[in-house]
Image: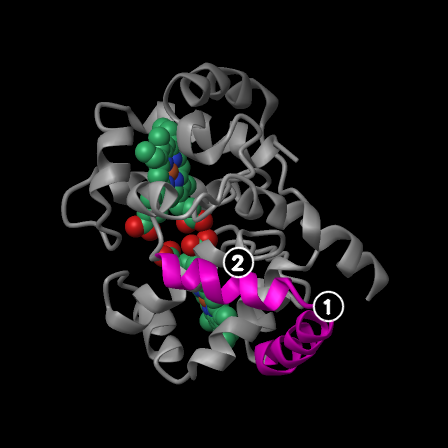
Amino acid sequence: MRSVLLWLPLAILGIAAGTGGESVAAQEPSPPHLLQRVRHVLADEGRLAAAIEAGRERGAFCFYCHGEDGNSRRPHVPKLAGQNPVYLLDQIERFATGARRTTYMQALARRFTDEDKLNLVIYFSSQPLRPAGGDPALAARGEPIYRSRCIGCHGLDGRGRRGYARLAGQQPEYLFRTLREFRDPGGRRDSPIMRTMVQGLSDGELRALAHYLASLR
Ligand code: HEC
Ligand code: HEC
């Protein structure tokens, strides 16, 4: 527990910093009320510890694919450890409403109460991430593309902030597929912002980006 509580504030720092209210909300990828709900739990150590415990229990079912500590070892399953809790909560809501299409995760997300969802994302995001690692040659090609197109939202270190996803250390195969889905019409994830960001990039460039991100810690 001690390591969790020491680690968590680092992940949250990005959320806590620069939260100036309306000005941030206007450009926020996730609805501000999700940010508020996460912050409410993080602000109180007792509440935080209870949420982590409840999330661990409720999440037992998720471990099979995402790993007990959120460090999935399956190439197509994303790691949830160390992920931004606001981003995770937003994605679970998207699964539940069908805005993000994945048959399995959609059916699952609909079964949870708001409280369950919050506890689950607090639990997984509080687990230390073990970076997936990437191919060094591909990563070297990906770095300049990342720096020129992506740091504005996901950060120079790829750790995300506010409602933006952490990309650093994620499974490279999952990243590659996800980027392709954003780019190609009819993808399961429809994000006008991300479509613009990856437009014109080849499969080779997307793979290079994925390996660069997977190699970040
Ligand atoms: C049978 C395997 C499986 C199980 C069990 C499972 N997931 Fe998933 N999950 C996936 C896959 C595969 C994806 C990626 C879907 C895609 O490609 O869009 C995913 C994606 C996610 C994402 C999005 C992550 C991101 O980076 O965008 C979240 C959040 C998530 N799962 C939470 C959960 C939670 C919470 C549970 C347990 C209640 C759970 N999952 C159980 C397979 C599973
Ligand atoms: C203007 C802000 C912005 C920029 C710049 C940006 N992104 Fe994103 N990114 C987002 C948003 C918003 C989402 C969530 C999209 C959704 O799920 O609807 C996202 C989601 C993602 C995801 C999904 C993460 C996951 O766990 O499933 C990946 C991967 C990603 N971005 C990679 C990139 C890369 C690579 C670049 C540069 C080529 C980039 N992004 C540039 C805003 C941005």
Relative vertical location of residue 5 with respect to residue 167 in this rendering, above or below: below
Q: Position of residue 136 (x, y in %)?
A: 60, 22
The colour scheme applied to this rendered structure is one colour
At 50% from the left edge and 31% from the top edge, which residue is drawn? 155
User: Position of 39 compared to 145: left or right?
Assistant: right
Where is residue 81, by image quadrant? bottom right
User: Position of 207 compared to 217: left or right?
Assistant: left
User: Position of 118 compared to 94: left or right?
Assistant: right
At 69% from the left edge and 78% from the top edge, which residue is drawn? 50
Whether residue 49 appears in this view of the structure is yes
Chief secondary structure of the magenta span?
Answer: helix
Q: Nearer the viewer, mark 1 or mark 2?
A: 1
State the extent of the magenta-drawn residues as a range.
Answer: 32-60
Ligand 2 appears in which quadrant? top left
Q: Amino acid at mark 1?
A: Glu
For the residue with label 2, is its CB less than 8 Å from the closest atom of ligand 1?
Answer: no
**Tag 1 residue:** 45
At 46% from the left edge and 14% from the top edge, which residue is drawn? 144
Q: Does residue 55 belong to the magenta stretch?
A: yes
Quadrant where the image shows the C terminus: top right
Quadrant where the image shows the N terminus: bottom right
Q: Amino acid at mark 2?
A: Pro
Looking at this view, is 93 or 50 the one in front? 50
Looking at this view, is 171 or 118 the one in front? 118
**Tag 2 residue:** 85
Q: Alpha carbon of mark 1 to alpha carbon of mark 2: how far?
A: 16 Å
> Local crowd at mark 1 within 10 Å, few (<14), some, or many (≥20)?
few
